Image: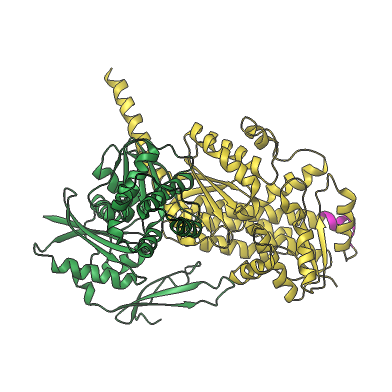
Chain colours: A green, B yellow
Amino acid sequence: MAYYLGIDVGSVSTNLVIIDEEGNVEEAVYIRTQGQPIKAVQEGMKMLSFRNRKKWDIKAAGTTGSGRQLAAVIVGADVVKNEITAHAVAAQKEVPDVQTVLEIGGQDSKIIILRDGVVTDFAMNTVCAAGTGSFLDQQANRLGIPIEEFGDHALKSKNPVRIAGRCAVFAESDMIHKQQLGYKTEDIIRGLCQALVRNYLNNVGKGKEIRPKVVFQGGVAANSGMKAAFEEALGMPVYVPRYHNVMGAIGAALLAREAGVENTAFKGFGVSDINFAADSFECRGCPNRCEVVNIKMEGKVIARWGDRCNKWKTIDSSGAA
Amino acid sequence: MRKVSFPYMGTSYIPIAKLMKAFGNEVVLPPRPNSETISLGCKFAPEFACYPFKIVLGTYVQVLEAGADTLVSTGGVGPCRAGLYTTLQEKILKNLGYKFEMITLEPPGRHFSDLMASIKKLINARLSFRDYINIGRFIWKELTLLDRAERLSHKTRPLEAKKGETTRVYKKCVDLVAKAESIKELAEIEREMELLYGGIEKKDFDPVKIGIVGEIYVLMEPSANLEIEETLGELGVYAERSMFLSGYTVSNAVMDLFHMAGERDVKKLASPYFKEMCGGHGRESVGNAVHFARRGFDGLIQLSPFTCIPEIVAKSILPRVCEESGMGFLSLTLDEQTGKEGVRTRLEAFVDLLFAKRKKMRLSSAKSQLAKEMS
């Protein structure tokens, strides 16, 4: 049977999934990127190879996320897609008549509007990361509550406290202030969820017509408090898919499946043992001063990017930098 | 001899430098805005000044360091604050201790005598009437040729079989025009340009078409808009800008001289949505969007510098224009914080969206065709 690999390298997490011909998720891996995308991809590949009892026959591989180019070079991907398209494709597979996708990840959030199965509009947060996963993580940490239980605490609250949600820094000082006044932790947490949803809808969702069905995905969708706050604010049910935290990777795998690849560029699960490294230099060829990145495999340069003029794109066979 | 310099915007430096030289000045060529320009600009500019202000200020510091003693820029009238920018930049630079003369070229229709006085300062050679005519003809030809080279590159790039070839040819054409010294040479270059572009191997398909509108500086200067046209072209998209150098010169200098409103058609097109002028190019952005829609474009991109009021006004109107005409809409805000990767991600997604829309439309029209045949 044919299988497809999808990889989503984001700022906070790196996700890998294997899907079968029907698009069912066979295996999913979720790893923290921790600023080392190469290592995260390799680690993910290693985890997959341990679970590879069926000896998956990978027909095509796709990558997405901010580290999509890098991941594509490491594993040998056939399809490299932006995360907006990937998320939309995955949401449609899960809920075919979806009209709105809310996605909140580690450091970005986006909204995707679909009509009759086609993406018609989208937006991504631009100026501020307030309300994304990293901020929630940090607040859970500060309150001494594991992030997994954060949402349940919010659901317990009967009287949410209003928290300023425009900016992460002000939200935090407002929360501290409310704590000092003696409000209950659960009320503050629910208030925070509401503030973040308000901020999301006013910022990323500004001017977008949100119609049902609404799918909520990304790491933050695991937070039941956030889901409840969205349902309350929108006045409609919000659907959280089972694999909500790896939807980008599923989308990449689905796109790889649809690409009609004959001979895959996939290098196999063995790439976890190869030595990959990245370094950069400033090109002084012109006033642009581009920072060019070298991706090296076993000391040989296999890919380069960052130059605007394509001067460094061609790599001689010796691979000397 | 005066050592003249000026802001860098697209390829305009080529004709401007030649004009200044013909008038008997030495020219200090401004560098293409780079990371150093931007950090200098941000260091000395007020934080919430717009991106063009910062880039131009940074350029001034660089050319003053390189020995320029005269800075020439255009002024302006109307609510957009850029019209007062030269005054503010002059103050900032003089406070920093630079010694130079700032010459502001105001629109001729309203400040004719000021403009003439400014131009007189820049003419430091004995020229006959005939010389003026020749210089004028040469510069105009050069402007239109540069625009032509760019338009051809926009048309060719999405179709190119080998990635990067159009960009190479375009750079070659600009080099050729930059080296030309007589109008005869320019005529030869015009023919060669057609041959060069004709020689690029092209694929045969109908690319997705995107119109680009917005504030003039970020629209015209590729380093400020992160080479958006090149990026789109390489994604297989035909991108057309609403503004070109020669058109801008005609509507803002020549027409103004005769007290005629420039780009009258565009303003008329904007009128159902936008009755008042709001400064800058806000109304033009809306009018051009209508124009693109009528020509059957698939999508519209608006480029605006962060905090640009005219474009913020346009941004609230453009979604309606696009919805009514079935065009996709994407607005990009640019400043020194904008990353090329983030812009690329949005552009890719936008192009995917337009492709999907087209495919669907074709599918539904095929269906209705079938229904017609069956009945």
The reply, left or right, for residue B277 in relation to residue A237 is right
Q: Which of these two is toward me, B71 or B2?
A: B71
Q: Which of these two is toward me, A176 or B279?
A: A176
Q: Residue B128: within the magenta? A: yes
Horizontal and vertical percent position of residue A241: 25, 47
Give the residue displayed 57% in from the left and 40% down from the top. B316
Looking at this view, name the residue that lies furthest to the front.
A182
Residue B221 appears in the picture as rendered: yes
Q: Is the magenta stretch mostly helix, strand or loop?
A: helix
Asked which quadrant contains residue B282, the reply is top right
Q: Which of these two is toward me, B275 or A130?
A: A130
Q: Write the start and end of the magenta stretch as one range.
A: B127-133
Q: Residue B374: within the magenta? A: no
The reply, left or right, for residue B281 in relation to residue B20 is left
Give the residue displayed 69% in from the left and 68% down from the top. B44
User: From the viewer's perspective, is residue B341 above or below residue B294?
Assistant: below
The reply, left or right, for residue B180 in relation to residue A297 is right
Horizontal and vertical percent position of residue A195: 44, 49
Looking at this view, name the residue that lies furthest to the left.
A54
User: In which quadrant of the rendered image does the N terminus of chain A lie?
Assistant: bottom left
Asked which quadrant contains residue A98, the reply is top left
Give the residue displayed 50% in from the left and 67% down from the top. A309
User: From the viewer's perspective, is residue B133 above or below residue B270?
Assistant: below
Horizontal and vertical percent position of residue A285: 55, 76
Give the residue displayed 55% in from the left and 39% down from the top. B318
User: In which quadrant of the rendered image does the C terminus of chain A lie?
Assistant: bottom left
